[in-house]
């Protein structure tokens, strides 16, 4: 989980020139590891998960670094599953 949060933080730091924020981002990482035949529900989307999945959510207050626009609360979420590799049939 620490690696997923560090990855998100590094990407935010790289984009810092694009936005201004006075509040540190809140990064949430959820790890789902369902057992075979026992799916789990994704906490945010409600999707049924049958494979190991890591979900990352980032919340921050940001405004464009230049211009008259005001700050807005932004939330972004993404997840990735680890799928079992299927062996190709030999011909």
Image (tube, rainbow, N blue to C red):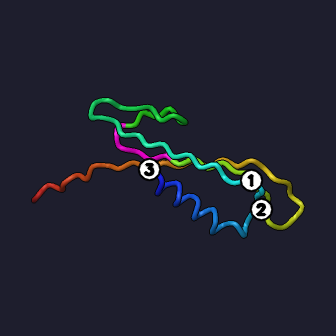
Location of mark 3 (residue): 80
Q: Secondary structure at mark 1?
A: loop
- Magenta residues, as a range? 50-55
Q: Secondary structure at mark 3?
A: strand
Q: Earlier in the sequence, mark 1 or mark 3?
A: 1
Nearer to us in this view, 1 or 62: 1
Nearer to us in this view, 7 or 75: 7
Q: Secondary structure at mark 2?
A: strand
- Asked whether residue 51 is drawn in magenta, I would say yes
Location of mark 1 (residue): 23
Q: Nearer the viewer, mark 2 or mark 1?
A: 1
- Please give left or right for residue 3 compared with residue 25 in the image: left
Name the disc covering residue 8, or none: none
Name the disc covering residue 20, or none: 2
Q: Label 3 vs label 2: CA separation?
A: 28 Å
Q: Nearer the viewer, mark 3 or mark 2?
A: 2
- Please give left or right for residue 68 compared with residue 9 in the image: right
């Amino acid at each position: 989980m620490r690696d997923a949060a560090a990855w998100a933080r590094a990407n935010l730091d790289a984009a810092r020139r694009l936005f201004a924020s006075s509040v540190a981002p809140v990064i949430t990482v959820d790890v789902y590891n369902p057992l075979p035949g026992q799916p789990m529900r994704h906490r945010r989307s409600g999707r049924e998960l049958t494979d190991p999945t890591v979900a990352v959510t980032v919340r921050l207050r940001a405004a464009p670094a230049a211009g008259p626009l005001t700050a807005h609360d932004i939330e972004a979420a993404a997840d990735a599953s680890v799928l079992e590799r299927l062996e190709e049939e030999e011909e």
